[in-house]
Image (cartoon, helix red, strand yellow):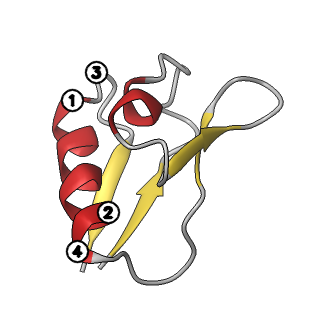
Amino acid sequence: MRVVIDADLCQGQGRCFSIAPSVFGFDELGSGVVLVTGELGEGELELARLAEANCPEHAVEVRE
């Protein structure tokens, strides 16, 4: 499993970062970015799914 952020949808509200700061960060424009490359660990995966569910723009996606 891995996580991605759709840059076209992200408005930089920061909920993903608030929920999972070890998985998400911000770029120079304040948009969300994924910090973890490759597969997520079990704890990170759980937090990423929570961030996906709480993103108001539906920009976060956990993929198989």
Residue 64: x and y in percent read 24, 80
Residue ID for mark 4: 42
Dot 2 amino acid type = Glu
As drawn, the label of residue 44 is: 2
Element assignment for label 1: helix
The residue located at (57%, 75%) in the rendering is 37
Element assignment for label 3: loop
Q: Is tag 1's residue or tag 4's residue first in the polypeptide sequence?
A: 4
Q: Is tag 3's residue or tag 4's residue first in the polypeptide sequence?
A: 4
Residue at mark 1 to residue at mark 4: CA–CA distance: 19 Å
Residue 36: x and y in percent read 54, 67
Residue at mark 3 to residue at mark 4: CA–CA distance: 24 Å
Q: Is tag 2's residue or tag 3's residue first in the polypeptide sequence?
A: 2
Callout in the foreground (2, 3): 2
Circle 3/circle 1 CB separation < 8 Å: yes
Dot 3 amino acid type = Pro
**Would you identify the image quadrant in which residue 54 lies?**
top left
Callout in the foreground (3, 1): 1
Dot 1 amino acid type = Asn
Residue at mark 2 to residue at mark 4: CA–CA distance: 5 Å
Residue at mark 2 to residue at mark 3: CA–CA distance: 20 Å
The residue located at (32%, 63%) in the rendering is 44
Callout in the foreground (1, 4): 4
Relative vertical location of residue 29 with respect to residue 26 in this rendering, above or below: above
Q: Is tag 1's residue or tag 2's residue first in the polypeptide sequence?
A: 2
Q: Is residue 46 left or right of residue 62?
A: left
As drawn, the label of residue 14 is: none
Residue ID for mark 3: 56
Residue at mark 3 to residue at mark 1: CA–CA distance: 6 Å
* Structural crowding at the residue carrying mark 3, measured as other residues with C-alpha within 10 Å and reported as few (<14), some (14–19) or many (≥20): some
Residue ID for mark 1: 54
